[in-house]
Amino acid sequence: MTGLKPLSFAAVAAAVAIAAAGCGSSSTSGSSTTSASSGNGSAYGGGASSSTTKAVSAPATAAASIAAIGVAHGHLVDARGRTLYLFEADTTSKSTCNGACASAWPPVTTSGTPKAVHGAKASMLKTSKRSNGATQVTYDGHPLYRYIGDTAPGQTNGQGLDAFGAFWYMVNPGGTAITG
């Protein structure tokens, strides 16, 4: 092994950090999507949005407040106007999306009773316990998720994706998948 120089600790640490960032998983928590306040205008129907770009990170696993679910552009959204999805692999109100799946498709969780606003139906909002003990919001029996690739209100980048063994679809106010 002549001619090779040993790598410094800093170089190895930088390489590990770059590789970990490329894997798409993180142990840090991002902001919870369960807050009922958007903080920057109307979250439903395209209110004002912040001009700063936030880095995408893994979602918080513990909910900070009550989830507010509404309707914008004909599909369910969270309090920040971010699109909500159902996972076709979920055949009951119990989520089958855990681990890497839940990192890419963060579940909508709550610490209280979810609240229907702006066209969502309160009678369809319920909750279900996740395998990690968190309380996930369901709509018409479907556990709800966000997509990590949707970084701003109104985005629908997860619509129709086939990932983790099944398709992901937006949910209409009647509780069914929007497949078209």
Image (tube, rainbow, N blue to C red):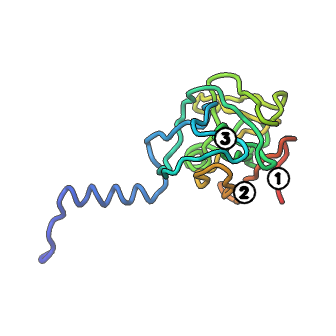
Q: Give the SS element for disc 2.
A: loop
Q: Nearer the observer, disc 1 or disc 3? A: 3
Disc 1: which residue? 178
Q: Which mark is residue 33?
A: none
Disc 2: which residue? 159
Q: Are marks 1 and 3 in contact (CB under 8 Å)?
A: no
Residue 133, percent from left and from top? 59, 28
Q: Looking at the rendering, in which quadrant would you find the N terminus?
A: bottom left
Q: CA distance from mark 2 to mark 1?
A: 8 Å
Q: Earlier in the sequence, mark 1 or mark 3?
A: 3
Q: Are marks 2 and 1 in contact (CB under 8 Å)?
A: yes
Q: Residues within 10 Å of mark 3 (few under 14, many from 20)?
A: many
Q: CA distance from mark 2 to mark 3?
A: 20 Å
Q: Earlier in the sequence, mark 2 or mark 1?
A: 2
Q: Residue at x 33, y 57 (%)?
A: 16
Q: Residues within 10 Å of mark 2 (few under 14, many from 20)?
A: many
